[in-house]
Image (cartoon, rainbow, N blue to C red):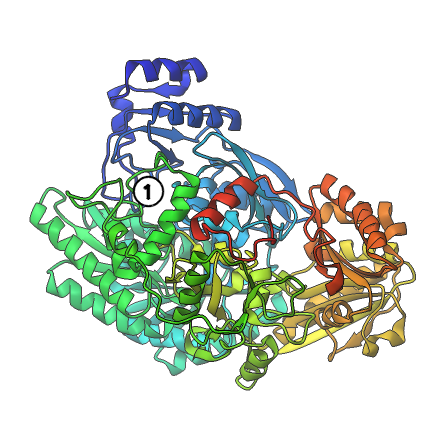
Amino acid sequence: MIQARALHALYKIINAEQIAVDRASLIAYEVDAGLDKGLPNGIVFPRTPEEVVRILQWSHEYQIPLVARGAGTGLSGGSVADRGGIIVEFAHMNRLRELDIPGRRAVVEPALINLHLAEQVKAAGLYFPPDPSSQRVSTMGGNVAENSGGPHCFKYGVTTNYVLGMQVALASGRLLQLGGLALDYPEYDLCGLLTGSEGLLGLITSIVVRLVRNPPGVKTLLAVFESIEQAGEAVSAVIASGLVPATMEMMDQRIVGIIEPFARANLPLDAGAVLIVEVDGYPASLTAQMDELIQILERHGGRQMRIARDEEERYKIWLARKSAAGAIAREAPAYCTVDITVPRSRLAEMLVEVNRICDLYQVRAGHVFHAGDGNLHPLVLIPDPEDPELIQRVHLAGRDMVNYCVKMGGSLTGEHGVGIEKREFMPLMHTATELMAMWKVKQAFDPDCLLNPGKVFPSPLPDEPGPYAGYLAESQIVHQSQYPLPVSETFNPSHALEAADWLHTLSQQKRAVLISNQAQRAEGARMSSEGLRDIVCYAPEDMYITVGAGARLSEIQSFLAQYGKQIALASPWPMATIGGLVAANVNAPLRMRYGAVRDQVLCATVALTDGNVIRTGRPIVKNVAGFDMTKLFVGSYGTLGLLTDLSLRIHPLPRTIQTLLIPVDRLEQGLVWGQQLAEITLNASALVLCSEGQDQARMVGNNLLIYTVEGLTEDVSAELQQVRNLLKQLGAPTPLEATRVSGTAIWTETLGNQLENSLLVRIGLPTSILHNYFLQHAHVLVPGKVVLDIANGFLYIRRVCASCEEAQEWLAALRGPALADSGYAVVMDLPLEWEGQIERWGYQAQSLPLMQRLKDQFDPQSILNPLVLF
């Protein structure tokens, strides 16, 4: 019960009609869509961010827990108040605040229904890909809190890949803007950290999401297999071929038999397994994609191929797939959805094991899962929810499935979250040190543990102190150094344990250390990843590669090219390392097709200053087992730990790459044309405007507008024809076609062309602001070499300056207006002798105090890159 004094204070800050404490209301909120229950002490319905802040301040003053809730469709107990407290129900904060069509951005409130957002942006020709099965009722805030996936994540990614910014209220009652309408703000990726954090770190009051162009064509195929194991092998074969369907979903015979009477989608009831495969793109490519897919599926036992004739038939197929959870009520009054992810190459093996476990515990289950992602959802039927012996067998079966999955290198949850359901399973997947690293994050955000207590972390044993324990004592064992510090001031560890040991000793000695492979001007120790250059694991069947952080990007690309693969990273610097690019979050124009650095890194190994080593996740597509610690280290500039190896997505080399080079007399005119072209990009990997191109391109003029498309030949041809047609309408010159030049290559060469006494500056802006900013400040920009990454909202300029003082004055003229336009200007490169005299960042994030608290947790002696970001 809430004390009368506290309740009276709550009524003073929130209208009475927005508070419910009657038992009928409390019972309605004691469950979500899972099995766990917990009766709250009250429910409050805020309408504005300011009210959320007041609720948090009240919670802090009276030490009353808060649990955020949207539609209550979660399956792991994430929004259940099993430890009492107040549920903060966001139902009234449900607006689409802003839709920027040219910039492909939307600002949404947390209770906006996913499907409502999808429908509104589709009317504008745009697409929000994350589409969980509950999208007809689930909210955007809940999707972000759980990092929801969905059927189309195989090609397009999960929720975190679309969150650019958020407004969040912290446990202290402070309201912060994290990220925003521009990209790559110079701050820790706290948006990535909060996405999937299950409401343990803050209450989200608005979200900035990116959108993509709605694909103009789509085809959906049903394929029948004798067994789910056979279908799983067919899925692996499709992935190995280099094809990237929009989705690959699978259902077994039991689920089909349950769904078909409800959905009437003409699903084959005699099939051992049904595979739904969807391809999208330009209409010209769909037939070729389908033909190739059908050939692969037939070679692996597929039969009775059926392509949906029209949108109505396609709708019925997807209604059937997304109605599985509801339709299963015809078979049993309750069920338990087990959410696990395995490496895709081990999908068939895991399916066999799940069936064996079900037989062992004498429970019945049906299969419906995201086959392309390796994300399984065995639906374990519960005919009698009041039978404790049956419930125990269901939980034991679930635990065995999770245990086997983790041993295969998978995750205990791919998209449903840990919540209450799997909190005790966390030690199966994470070491005590890794759980302690997550606990440090929790402490930095919510030291009083008032936000969603009892979730994610294992419960304490009866004799253990604190709200969470089990791993605390083990992780606090005093570290004993094993590796003496080398005599040299440059440390080159050969493995993660050695690096962590040295960092621990340096921390004890309070000796500052610069983490860098480059020469340094400052005195002191330097730790390099030069000795960490191995290819640790190449897994083409699972589409990832694990490499040492010191590996050169050029070396890894050369290795992968032998096998027709690549990683979607590029750098202006030939000696750039993988770890350096990730730590600095350097993104090339190709991010518009493949995603940012943060989207390419699946997991990492990190050496910490306490002498421990953690692994931040697993090399799989879907994983929400705890906080997304990988995002915390991407772009952290080595201020939290040393990256020692990284697992990165690999992509097939595109079958076709083609570039149009458009000569431009005036950069202003090229920018106008470029922003018009940005509205039609679908498969483009670069849309760049340069004041000076690479040697191969200079024949058409000094100023160039470059449009590169890559992918299937039919898609590339169709998009470039649209570009030509639009350029003709705009009165632009006839473009020159090139197959050996790309916008990213020109960006790389231009930025990497170092000049004596020059600064290289990156200005990040909302894409809708880029044009006006350039026009207003062209007189400051033009004397330098200018590159505009139009689609991503970046302006790069290299300027030769006669002195450090001149450079400072010039930089200030760019930086102030950028900050005023919700952007920033950072220095990417400068002469060594100017280091320390020129402010690299010129940007103070609202989250700086929070960043400092995280820094204090991971680096309490502040030895790591002490002059970076702070």
Outermost residue toward the right in this view: 665
Answer left or right for 607 relative to 409. right
Which residue is identified by label 1?
A: 78
Please determine whether, in this image, residue 527 is positioned above or below residue 302: above
Residue 313 appearing in the image = no
Asked which quadrant contains residue 3, the reply is top left
Q: Nearer the viewer, residue 152 or 16?
A: 16
Q: Position of residue 245 (x, y in %)?
A: 49, 68
Q: Amino acid at mark 1?
A: Gly
Q: Position of residue 156 (x, y in %)?
A: 52, 60
Q: How many numbered circles does the render carry? A: 1
Q: Residue at x 49, y 52 (%)?
A: 160
Q: Position of residue 828 (x, y in %)?
A: 70, 60
Q: Residue at x 45, y 50 (%)?
A: 860
Q: Nearer the viewer, residue 853 or 44?
A: 853
Outermost residue toward the bottom in this view: 562
Answer left or right for 790 relative to 227. right
On-image quarter of the N terminus: top left
Q: Residue at x 12, y 51 (%)?
A: 392
Q: Nearer the viewer, residue 857 or 343?
A: 857
SS for callout 1: loop
Answer left or right for 120 relative to 240. right
User: How dense is the environment of label 1, judged by Cα within 10 Å: few (below 14), some, or many (20 and up)?
Assistant: many
Please determine whether, in this image, residue 361 is positioned above or below residue 95: below
